[in-house]
Amino acid sequence: MHNRQIGFLCYLLAVTAGIGGYVMAADYSQHEDFGTKKPGDIVGFTATPPGKVLTGMVNEPGGFIWVGGLARWDGTIPDNFAGTHGGRFSGTYLPPLGGPGTHIYTWEADTKALVSKIRVKIKNHTKLTYDGLNSDGYFECQIIPACYHASDYNWKYEWILPGLNNPQVSFVNPTGSETAIAKAHWYSTSSNPLNYDAAVYKIYCEATVDGTLYVNEAEEYFYVEVYNPAGYCERPVCTYMDFTYTKEKGKYTVTGIETWAREDAAPYNQYASSSQFYQKVEAHEQQHKVDYNNGFAGHVFYSAEEFAPQIIGLQSSNWGQLQTTVKQKFNQYCAAEELEMDSLFNTIEDRAFAISDAITPFLVYQRGGAGL
């Protein structure tokens, strides 16, 4: 090999080594700004020094995965990359009409990109609902950063195993960026009828951005409660009574009942008809109504016919005294009726449970469970 050729080769190796260690400034610099990108995007550039590229290398990948050689490089943005990318490349080139003994020039290129990792976030404007009811708020699926827009949304949910009692959620708008709970079932994690803790649902939003499916990273929950008690029945009561009388020879005598204002038993169901528990609770409380209003064991509570014999025939020459006596009799009768209903409470409950226990679902509002 001629001396001039050996000198040229040594010079080329020295220059290349120098570039790898950033010892010298490049003769040609190139800047590539890819703008804002997201994980999974592919970027690329071609070094365009004024001449023939002899060598090229990646000095600093900047977090990207680069393939290529000499002047052409293509990069893939990893899924877990986010932030500002800065890459650096360098090499040598031979200007036009160059040859042995001609000066070898250096080139360098730097690349820049702002990589925003796409995230899905659920903004929760509601936390609680009751079985069968719409939630009083809504959920919002947000794409971060806001410059990205989803083409599709899909709301999903999960429950805690074993999930007894048919866990189920219906969304108002299951494919929209915002949704609410249209209907949700309470469920239990235990077969114990005394376990009526709130049912916990984990909620997800899947969003498709530029063909890629994303799901919320932070866990979000909402809760479905059951009422305790689920219903109740107001007992019958007499709110007003007045009596008839005669006055002869200076004496007032009670002859009968003129007014008997009795309010019938009134059942109340806490649940809406959309609840899985509505029919069960309704049957239970309606049985109470029957027992209280139509009589139990042959006894109709707060009956004018039953009370009348207790005051008919009462006499007094003092009208005020007669009124007081009748009032005392009425109060004693009402107190006795309440005591009797108290004493029959367990029996009346048993009769109602005999009806409601046979109605699904068979958790919570069974005999020995939460209040009915």
Image: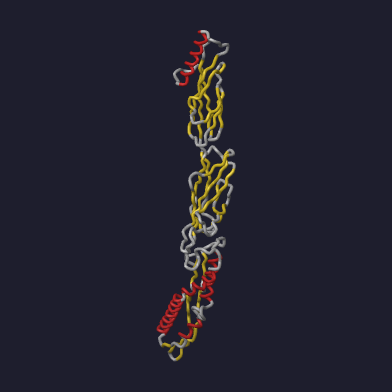
Numbered circles on residues, count: 0
The colour scheme used to paint the residues is secondary structure
Residue drawn at 54 percent across, 58 percent down:
185
Residue 234, position in %: x, y? 49, 71
Residue drawn at 50 percent across, 76 percent down:
262
Q: Residue furthest toward the top?
A: 3
Question: In the rendered image of this protein, does residue 181 appear above or below residue 346?
Answer: above
Question: In the rendered image of this protein, does residue 85 appear above or below residue 194?
Answer: above
Q: Residue furthest toward the front?
A: 1
Question: In the rendered image of this protein, does residue 322 appear above or below residue 146?
Answer: below
| Image quadrant where residue 48 sits | top right
Q: Nearer the viewer, residue 304 or 198?
A: 198
Q: Residue furthest toward the bottom?
A: 249
Residue drawn at 52 percent across, 27 percent down:
33
Residue 207, position in %: x, y? 56, 43
Question: In the rendered image of this protein, does residue 319 appear above or below residue 267?
Answer: below
Residue 90, position in %: x, y? 50, 21
Residue 40, position in %: x, y? 55, 35
